[in-house]
Image (tube, rainbow, N blue to C red):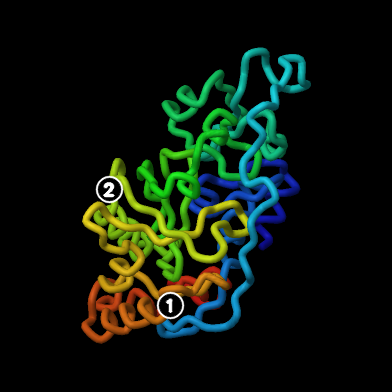
Amino acid sequence: MIALVAVLLSGCEVPARWAEDTPELPGLADLLQEAADSLPGIPRSSGQSGGSGAPASIPDNPRPDAARNIPASVSGIPAGARFVASSRGSVYYWVGCDSWRSLSAGNRRWFQNATEAEAAGFQPSTARGCQDPDLAAAATPVETGFCTVTRIVDGDTLTCAEGAARIRLLLVDTPELAQGPTGSSARLALEQILPPGTPARVELDRDPYDRYGRILAYLYTPDDRMVNEELARSGYAVVLLIAPNNRYERRMITAVEEARTAGRGLWATGGFTCEPALFRAGECRP
């Protein structure tokens, strides 16, 4: 906490390793991403789901208005620039949003288009209103029912080509990347099930978005295996309930119990001694 306060007072961005793989929040996107992912649901220990969870809600406008144009004369924005990133961060922002203004002026990098930003190694921001308006105006997996995987963020989150959407897998919780080898192993497990470029069928539950604008879904491989269940059954996830989305809760609990009993995946190495939710809450360390 002291380190975070110091960052705020200094006006510097949080190092990319702090902000890489968790949801972005408007205004403090590079600072509070890791803390944000601790809020979506309330799991029980030993892989059991429980509690009511914090009900997810559909944002009033989960995608920015594609019709907005930013004049070149806007203070602080070079003529012709449409996107900005921090040289110390990992995401880029459309200049029509406000989240990027917290970045230190000396670290800002400007781009005329999203292609330039991504060629420089940056990923699109998921903060509301900060995505490329051209992509945001495109149909997302909610409308199309499909996700063409572009990037595996961590063991339970990925991005899609359709509308540059980010999907959070329902009813599973995998170790955070900050947990070291266990987080990396879970990410690799998801990547092996759904390599980038794979088209996945999308199934929604009752609430399609979480409070951060991520799509909440069950994904299916081209041969119709449920990805969420595959992660649980192979031993790389415990159950997390993001209420009211509980359609396959019993099925997921069974898969986790099966993996634990058989000693598969991370259960074989003590990878869930510090469960993801407890780690995010600061109650244990890997």
What residue sits right under mark 1 in the picture? 249
Is 244 above or below relative to 189? below
- Between the C-alphas of marks 2 and 1, the distance is 25 Å
Query: Of the residues shown, which amino acid type is indicated by label 2?
Result: Pro
Q: Does residue 275 appear to the left or right of 64 in the view shown?
A: left
In percent of width and height, residue 106 lies at 65, 28
- Asked if marks 2 and 1 touch (Cβ < 8 Å), the reply is no
Q: Write the residue at 65% across / 39% down.
A: 129
Quarter of the N terminus within the rendering: bottom right
Query: Of the residues shown, which amino acid type is indicated by label 1?
Result: Glu
Quarter of the C terminus within the rendering: bottom left
What residue sits right under mark 2 in the picture? 195
In the image shown, does 168 or 45 lie closer to the viewer? Answer: 168
Is 88 above or below relative to 231? above
- First in sequence, mark 2 or 1: give its number: 2
Is 184 above or below relative to 77? below
Q: Secondary structure at mark 1?
A: helix
In percent of width and height, residue 18 lies at 53, 52
In percent of width and height, residue 230 lies at 28, 67
